[in-house]
Image (tube, rainbow, N blue to C red):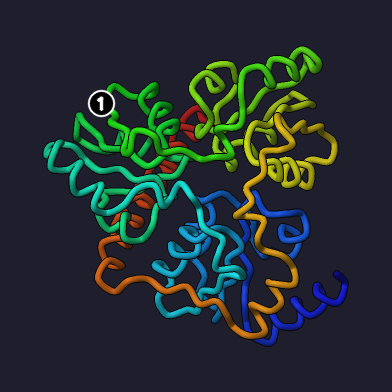
Amino acid sequence: MTNNLQEIERLKKEKNAVILAHNYQTRAIQEIADFTGDSLELCIKASKIKKADIVVFCGVDFMAETAALLNPHKKILIPDLNAECPMAHMLSAEDIKKAKQAYPDAAVVLYINTTAEAKSKADILCTSANAVEVAESLPHEQILFGPDRNLAWHVSQQTNKEIIPLPEQGHCYVHKMFNLGDLYFLSEKNLDAEILVHPECEPSVQKFADKVLSTGGMIHHVTQSLHKTFIIATEVDMTTRLERDHPDKTFIPALNEAICKNMKLHTLEKVKNCLLNEEFIVKTNENTKNAAKRAIKRMMDVSKNQNKMNKSIKEAVENG
């Protein structure tokens, strides 16, 4: 491992490369990354990369595709081409086309966990962190929302708009593993723990939680919370990220088996080979990239405006 670490650091400097990693990556990958975050954070970081020539993306395919869309003049690499998000492939461009014919007055809001081709058919994208804000930003009363049905349900609980799941059974196989029994058992054993769950979890699990948050939201909340113990219902390596940031607090995975095998395909050896051979290059379809990029940028504009609004509210409160 030491040789791989040293070689990765050498190659990063030699090739003017940066490494981005999702919060679900293993500790080893998180520790060699220049930046670790959730989907929205990685989107924003990818859009702001100026000086690097190469971006190595340790995440699943749609994340690397998004980085490629936002950085057309940079070489975007993914260490393992098989790191695909099954949910992202549950919704096709043809599915969206048919849904739009059935609901001609509805806006199309797609979770960023979609392929570039599907993104090109969206009015706007969202992440689990900003899905509610994105839905609220639109004038439409009906919203076709896909592909995660549980995130769609979460949004429907926070807005008066009609949220139509697309497809009806779209889901993340990892977050479907969590159930009320496991959470109840852990909460009984850890009475002082705060329960944080991801909005891709089933509605019953979301209702039981103290907070429903994206992974970035979990990081922010834990920083502010007075609690010392947390039960975390999302991919198991989220606790790795939280433990790195908060060694003084205790994080209990709601389920040790909640592992995204696709995320875990990236290893130090593959990252090293990725830099050494400059493969595998992530490419996007020329026919769809401009429309997909527009949908991404609309989402980022909503988040930017929301952040400005939050800052203004905070300043107003602080100034009395």
Residue at image x 54%, y 81%?
53
Characterize the local packing of mark 1: few (<14), some (14-19) or many (20 or more) Cα atoms within 10 angstroms.
some
Question: Seen in the image, is 61 located left or right of residue 174?
Answer: left
- Residue drawn 50% across and 77% down? 281
Direction right: furthest residue = 2
Q: Amino acid at mark 1?
A: Glu
Q: Nearer the viewer, residue 249 or 165?
A: 165
- Vertical placement of residue 177 versus 261, above or below: above
Q: Nearer the viewer, residue 39 or 97?
A: 97
Give the x, y percent position of residue 271: 68, 72
- Measuring from the top left, give residue 219's x and y in whole percent: 65, 40
Residue sitting at 63 percent across and 28 percent down?
196
Query: With 118 as the anchor, is 223 left or right in this view?
Result: right
Residue 116 x %, y %: 36, 61
Q: Is residue 40 left or right of residue 103?
A: right
Q: How many marks?
A: 1
Quarter of image, res 185: top right
Q: Which image quarter is the N terminus in?
A: bottom right
> On the image, numbered disc 1 is attached to which residue?
162
Q: Is residue 223 above or below residue 188?
A: below
Left or right? Give the position of 105 relative to 4: left
Which of 306 and 279 lies nearest the eye of the viewer? 279
The spot of residue 298 in percent (x, y) is 31, 52
Q: Quadrant of residue 151?
A: top left
Query: Could you say whether the residue bearing mark 1 is in a helix, strand or loop?
Result: strand
User: In this rendering, is residue 71 above or below 297?
Assistant: below
Residue lying at 32% horizontally and 71% vertically, measured from the top left: 285
